[in-house]
Image (cartoon, rainbow, N blue to C red):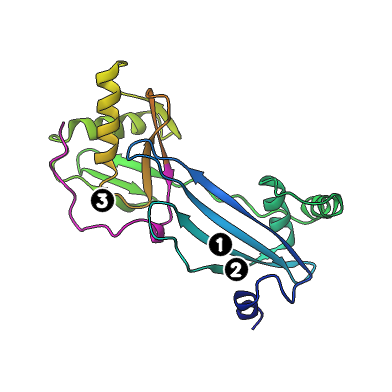
Amino acid sequence: MFLEFVRRNPGKGCWKTFPSFKVNVSYDSFEGYEQSWTERELFAYREDLWVAGSTFMHIEAPCASDTDYEILPAAETASMLLTYNVPLGVEDLIWLKKLAVTRPQPSPPSAPSIAWNRELGELTIDGQLARRIARPKQAKNVTKILEAFQEDGWPVRIDSPFEADEAGRTRLRETGSQLNVQLTGIKFEADGTGEGVRYRLIPVQQTADVQSSADDTLAI
């Protein structure tokens, strides 16, 4: 009943309402300017329990209107607010720091396991298929990026595997756009310098519908 009340009357009937704030802001240099974020609204209705509402937004796609509400422990919520530098008064900051220190902190989620299997032409995340390339030998530039990430152990960013000239930067940009075709759970993007490529993980429900077979005409 309380969650339904919050949905209908955000900020009412709660002990305390904190400002909304944004997380996961990102820009994609491959496909032009875009911005994605998750907007959070936090409501304290007991000293040790909170309600957090999360809404995913994207400026180049219809904005998601559905908001998912979840119950959060006070310590986790306090740490979240302090991490994202939500503008708060002095009394609120003192209270949140006390909650974050004196309450047990949740264990951080384990990093997902990302793997590229050239023989199978499969990119997987925690064993789940993110993309299958039917003929990887023909998609030389795409597999070159995937193999570079695989060899380095999947850091967040790698140097471009292409030439350090205008032709190489163009190839990186075009290959990145093709790599993102029919991709689930992950997205690759230029690092803004023209000299590197990075990736970010995306919840499956936020990705576009993925067809069952991948485009096998990716060679540039």
Q: Secondary structure at mark 2?
A: strand
Residue 198 appears at what percent x and percent y? 41, 34
Identify the mark nearer the N-term, 1 or 2. Answer: 1
Q: Position of residue 155 (x, y in %)?
A: 44, 33
In this rendering, the label closer to the viewer, 1 or 2: 1
- Distance, label 2 to label 3, CA atoms, is 30 Å
* Magenta span includes 82: no
- CA neighbours of label 2 inside 10 A, class few (<14), some (14 to 19), many (20+): few
Mark 1 lies on a secondary structure that is: strand
In this view, 7 is above or below 207? below
How far, Cα to Cα, is label 1 from label 2?
9 Å
**Is residue 162 shown to the viewer in this render?**
no
- The residue singled out by tag 2 in the image is 70
The amino acid at mark 1 is Ser
User: On the image, numbered disc 3 is attached to which residue?
Assistant: 182
The secondary structure that dominates the magenta segment is loop
Quarter of the image for residue 176 reads top left
Q: Is residue 48 left or right of residue 111?
A: right
Label 3 CA crowd tier, 10 Å (few <14, some 14–19, many 20+):
some
Amino acid type, residue under disc 3 in the picture = Gln
* Rendered image: mark on residue 54: 1
Q: Amino acid at mark 2?
A: Glu
- Which comes before the other along the chain, label 1 or label 3? 1
The residue most toward the bottom is 1
Of the pair 40 and 74, the residue shown nearer to us:
40
Q: Residue at x 64, y 75 (%)?
A: 6
Mark 1 vs mark 3, CA separation in Å:
26 Å
User: Considering only vertical position in the picture, is 61 above or below 43?
Assistant: above
Counting from the top left corner in percent of width and height, residue 180 is at: 29, 44
- What stretch of residues is rendered in magenta? 200-220
